Image (cartoon, rainbow, N blue to C red):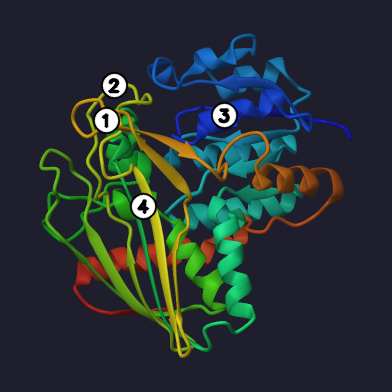
């Protein structure tokens, strides 16, 4: 078992610290990390004491030509430049959940990755969660009969207070696009941050999107310029009706650095799913977080993740290793994920135009 020499690029994404445990994973050797200077005090970099740290990707790669793979944990708008860099060097990529929303950039990334012959796995952890695998098993064994409808919610805090790039349209969506003509709200909020349920619906239903209609509610946070409350309904090509809620609907404490104990009820991340069939229904909490109230003021609580969504022993990292060492294919790669991003953009178009959008 030859370890993969791996690095973490930028560390600004909220999921980045979940990969710090790579230093303890026998299948990987965490070689280095790069950090955006403005974020150094926000990303728990002290947990990587002894791991070389750099303020630019170029400096990191020049110092460590042995790097074989990276966790691309940067702001969304930087992904194209980093894909170019990795493709030129033949470095494999595990990308955060949104490669880009700009479809021209997306197609350029696909082309670069295919020409370089590198792996680009996308971090969509629900694909590996035991709850989703159990639902898939029940459906394939016809436990609830033909599926009639699908409902899913992915609600959370807004992380922009401790991760400011999440509140900047140009950095999360890639450019400044009004949510509606003349609006002071721009694309790049809750919808942009929650691709999981948009991906899982295709996986669960074995179908593709046919049409979608989306509406915006007034923001519950008055001092932000991205959307935080949204609801979506639509139809799959096989006739299944769906509704999706990817809102920033949970309260958060506005702190400079997110640390345990700052969580406020309701939970900072909730992913719930209901599937109705001709013979029954499945109702599931698919994120698997146990909550313990700790008696602190302001409805605070602590979280224990029973199913280990991030970290050194995750199925996602096991898969990434196999793809690199044994030429296996990722469960979800950048090319497969393109359709989900296209659909999310169709949701934005539905809001802008106020009408149903049909997808080819």
Disc 3 designates what residue?
Answer: 9
Whether the residues at callouts 2 and 1 have beta carbons within 8 Å, the answer is: yes
- Do the residues under discs 3 and 2 have CB atoms within 8 angstroms? no
**Residue 256 numbered tag:** 2
Mark sitting earlier along the chain (1/3): 3
Q: Badge 4 local density, few (<14 within 10 Å), some, or many (20+)? A: many
Looking at the image, how many numbered discs can be counted on the residues?
4
| Element at label 3 | strand
Q: Nearer the viewer, mark 3 or mark 2?
A: 2
Which part of the image, by quadrant, shows the N terminus? top right
Cβ–Cβ under 8 Å for marks 1 and 3: no
Q: CA distance from mark 3 to mark 4?
A: 21 Å
Q: Position of residue 38 (x, y in %)?
A: 38, 18
C-alpha distance separating marks 4 and 1:
17 Å
Q: How far from the left and from the top, in percent, is residue 229?
A: 21, 55
For the residues carrying marks 2 and 4, which lies nearer the camera in this image? 2
Residue 319 placement (x, y as % from top left): 73, 48
Q: Which residue is mark 4?
A: 192
């Amino acid at each position: 078992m030859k370890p993969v020499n791996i690095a973490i690029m930028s560390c600004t994404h909220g999921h980045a610290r979940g990969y710090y445990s790579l230093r303890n994973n026998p299948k990987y050797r965490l070689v280095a990390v790069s950090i955006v200077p403005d974020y150094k005090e926000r990303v728990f970099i002290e947990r990587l004491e002894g791991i070389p740290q750099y303020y630019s990707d170029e400096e990191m790669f020049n110092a460590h030509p042995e790097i074989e793979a990276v966790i691309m944990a940067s702001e969304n708008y930087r992904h194209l430049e980093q894909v170019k860099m990795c493709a030129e060097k033949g470095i494999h990529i595990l990308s955060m959940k949104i490669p880009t929303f700009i479809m021209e950039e997306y197609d350029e990334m696909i082309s670069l990755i295919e020409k370089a012959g590198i792996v680009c796995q996308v971090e969509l952890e629900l694909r590996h969660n035991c709850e989703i695998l159990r639902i898939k098993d029940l459906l394939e064994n016809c436990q609830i009969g033909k599926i009639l409808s699908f409902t899913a919610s992915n609600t959370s805090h807004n992380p922009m207070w401790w991760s400011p790039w999440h509140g900047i349209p140009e950095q999360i969506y890639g450019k400044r696009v009004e949510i509606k003509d003349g609006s002071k709200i721009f694309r790049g909020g809750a919808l942009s941050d929650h691709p999981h349920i948009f991906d899982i619906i295709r996986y669960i239903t074995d179908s593709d999107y046919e049409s979608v209609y989306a509406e915006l509610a007034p923001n519950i946070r008055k001092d932000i310029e991205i959307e935080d409350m949204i609801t979506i309904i639509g139809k799959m090509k096989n006739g299944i009706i769906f509704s999706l809620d990817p809102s920033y609907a949970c309260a958060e404490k506005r702190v400079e650095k997110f640390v345990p104990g700052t969580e406020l009820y309701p939970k900072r991340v909730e992913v719930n799913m209901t599937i109705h069939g001709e013979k029954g229904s499945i109702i599931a909490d698919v994120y698997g977080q146990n909550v313990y109230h700790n008696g602190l003021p302001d409805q605070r609580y602590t979280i224990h993740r029973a199913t280990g969504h991030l970290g050194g022993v995750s199925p996602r990292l096991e898969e990434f290793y196999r793809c690199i060492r044994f030429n296996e294919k990722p469960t979800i790669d950048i090319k497969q994920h393109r359709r989900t991003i296209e659909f999310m953009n169709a949701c934005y178009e539905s809001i802008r135009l106020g009408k149903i959008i049909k997808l080819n």
